[in-house]
Amino acid sequence: MKIMSGVRSDETLEYMLSRRSVMAQLLKEPAPSREELETILSAAARVPDHGKLSPWYFLTFEGTQRVVLGEKIRDLFVQDNPDAKPEHREIEEGRFTRAPLVVGVVSRIRTGKPPMWEQILSSGAVCMNMVMAANACGYGAQWLTEWYAYDTRFREFLGLDARDTIAGFIHIGRVDETPEDRPRPDLAHIVTQWEEGKAINKGEQYNADKFGMPLQGFDFSEI
């Protein structure tokens, strides 16, 4: 069935209202075929892109290369945690072998009129499209980053530079059963029909201690 803008699709709505990610460790062989992967990547790239800059690109990790990456992650982890227990080292070593296919979505800021923030948002849309396309091809998927996505040493190992940021690693594979759904946001807490002077439902308080905030000079004492 072809889905076009402006044409109602109850099937698509049902999927979007029921989809959920599958934990990477539950994903199994086989990986998508070459043809399926091309379809997934083509769908992922079909996102809003102000200025037609394609401010992102893909890295695919399969086979023994996943082992190579796992060994690198383990070595970096041990470098920072020399007293780490064997079981913790094993967890780090297995980061890329949990699923038969991992696709790295890299946000790369392009030269042009569109602001950096819009280019980054486009990369996020790519990640979500990829998860949905993998599901549509009959696979489970999970969008992860984890600590090594932000580690300069690991990023350099991948061949990234200062203009590159890892938007996510999409883990893809077969799944025997989809886990139960998790709690979803209560729209009453995050939706406001705007009126001048009316209080806005902004959701839960921001945890400034746990997460960084991409705003220079922001006074977190006010939240």
Image (cartoon, rainbow, N blue to C red):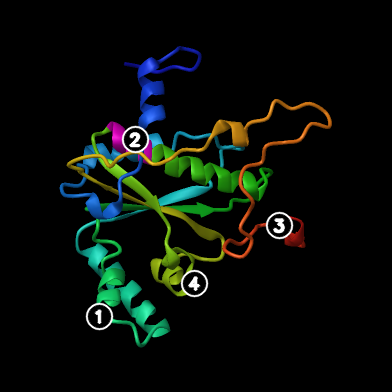
> Is most of the magenta stretch helix, strand or loop?
helix
Type of amino acid under label 4: Thr
Q: Which residues are magenta?
A: 131-136
Residue 104 falls inside the magenta stretch: no
Horizontal relation, residue 99 to residue 131: left or right: left
Please tell me the numbered disc located at residue 190.
none
Q: Is residue 135 magenta?
A: yes
Query: Which numbered marker is on residue 215?
Result: 3
Answer with mark 2 or mark 3, whichever residue precedes in sequence. Answer: 2
Q: Amino acid at mark 3?
A: Leu
Q: Nearer the viewer, mark 1 or mark 4?
A: 1
Q: Residues within 10 Å of mark 3 (few under 14, many from 20)?
A: few
Between disc 2 and disc 1, the foreground one is 1
Q: 45 and 87: which one is in front?
A: 87
Kind of residue sitting beneath label 1 = Pro
Q: x%, y% of residue 55?
A: 53, 47
- Quadrant that contains the C terminus: bottom right
Looking at the picture, tell me which residue is in the foreground, 119 or 85: 85
Give the CA separation, mark 4 to mark 2: 30 Å
Q: Give the mark toward the camera: 1 or 3.
A: 1
Instruction: Measure how far apart labels 2 and 3 are at the Cα level.
Output: 33 Å
Q: Which residue is mark 4?
A: 152
Q: CA distance from mark 1 to mark 3?
A: 39 Å
Question: Which residue does the numbered mark 2 point to in the structure image?
Answer: 133
Q: Mark 2 to mark 1: distance in Å?
A: 37 Å
